[in-house]
Amino acid sequence: MATWKIAPALAAGCAAILKPSKLASVTCLELGEICKEIGLPHGVLNIVTGLGHEAGASLASHPDVDKISFTGSSATGSKIMTTAAQLVKPVSLELGGKSPIVVFEDVDLDKVAEWTVFGCFFTNGQICSATSRLIVHESIAVEFVDKLVKWAENIKISDPLEEGCRLGPIVSEAHYKKVLNCISSAKSEGATILTGGRRPEHLKKGYFVEPTIITDVTTSMQIWREEVFGPVLAVKTFSTEEEAINLANDTHYGLGSAVMSNNLERCERLSKALQAGIVWINCAQPSFIQALWGGIKRSGFGRELGEWGLENYLSVKQVTRYTSDEPWGWYQSPSKL
Ligand SMILES: NC(=O)c1ccc[n+]([C@@H]2O[C@H](COP(=O)([O-])OP(=O)(O)OC[C@H]3O[C@@H](n4cnc5c(N)ncnc54)[C@H](O)[C@@H]3O)[C@@H](O)[C@H]2O)c1
Ligand SMILES: NCCCC=O
């Protein structure tokens, strides 16, 4: 995702400093090597590794950094915005989400089961736009959720270097514990873990969590409201389109959303009604370099990718040249007195 920022920044003529996550610095350093190989002039792209509260915070508050483009959690985004405000520094923020996937009763259940599983469990749910809140029509809920459980239990969980792996480990020990904690809080609040919720039996080490589906969820539960950033799907049912929209929008996030229905007029209505920066119709997660990316509400602001991504690093300047031979004439000339 670093290239979502670096490519348009360099194309717009800016020099850039990339500060990767401490958990994912190596690929960014490799990107630096590639830039050297292709002859990018020294100093145009600078990569500073380090801890967020040290390296990240220092960059955010540095008077020579003219613009901050941040991808990360809403909590850190808020800190960065506070820091940047001191110097009236522009920011664009790509933050967290708790994205809904709304499934109507007229769909092909198997096709939509695969999209639902992919939308939430792809890269272990460690995607900002993971469609982690399933809102399914009550008339198909039992059959659909039953299928989801079968799809989830069929996912190959293994060392990501193993052939056919579709779910690897969580990024760190701390995050692994956070994911398990979210699941146990849901349980203690009265939700039901239909499948998953623990380490797979065949993997004795590594931060693996089985794909998890949770029902009997209420809208006040943490599992419905807060981002897990792990392979955890929370399920609620609806009876009318209006109820589905209200459930989908009842969140302080607004990044992704998906609607699954064979009625394209209904999809169109929902794509307008859903309060999110991204709407997928009859799919979830495919993203394209030409199509804008970004959220509303606490998922942030600003858009990356496509021509919108370039605008983050451009500043429009007004230049006015006076072309008339006539004087301006607002004041009376003293020579005429
Ligand atoms: N909207 C998007 O496009 C998008 C994409 C990917 C991830 N995300 C979000 O990112 C989060 C997961 O990533 P994470 O765990 O790395 O997030 P994080 O907020 O913990 O860290 C993100 C970055 O901020 C830095 N940082 C931490 N404290 C800082 C501070 N005080 N000042 C400046 N920088 C600081 C970290 O070092 C890291 O590089 C999730 O919430 C996810 O939804 C959003
Ligand atoms: N497919 C893009 C995902 C970006 C957020 O994590």
Image (cartoon, rainbow, N blue to C red):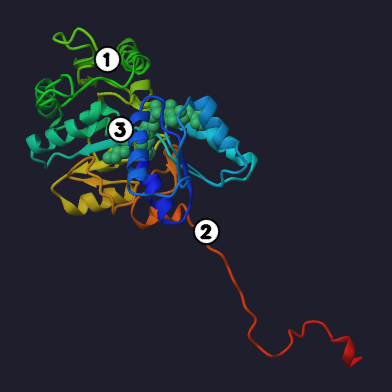
Q: Which residue is mark 2?
A: 315
Label 3 residue near ligand 2, CB within 8 Å: yes
Q: Quadrant of residue 280?
A: top left
What type is the residue that disc 2 sits on?
Ser
On residue 4, the disc is: none
Going by the numbered disc 3, the residue's amino acid type is: Ile
Question: Residue at left 15%, top 50%?
Answer: 263
SS of the residue at dot 2? loop
Assign the N terminus to one quadrant of the image. top left
Q: Quadrant of the C terminus?
A: bottom right
The amino acid beneath tag 1 is Tyr
**SS class, disc 1:** loop
Q: Pick the residue in front: 293 or 271.
A: 293
Residue tagged 1: 207
- SS at badge 3: loop
Mark 3, residue position: 127
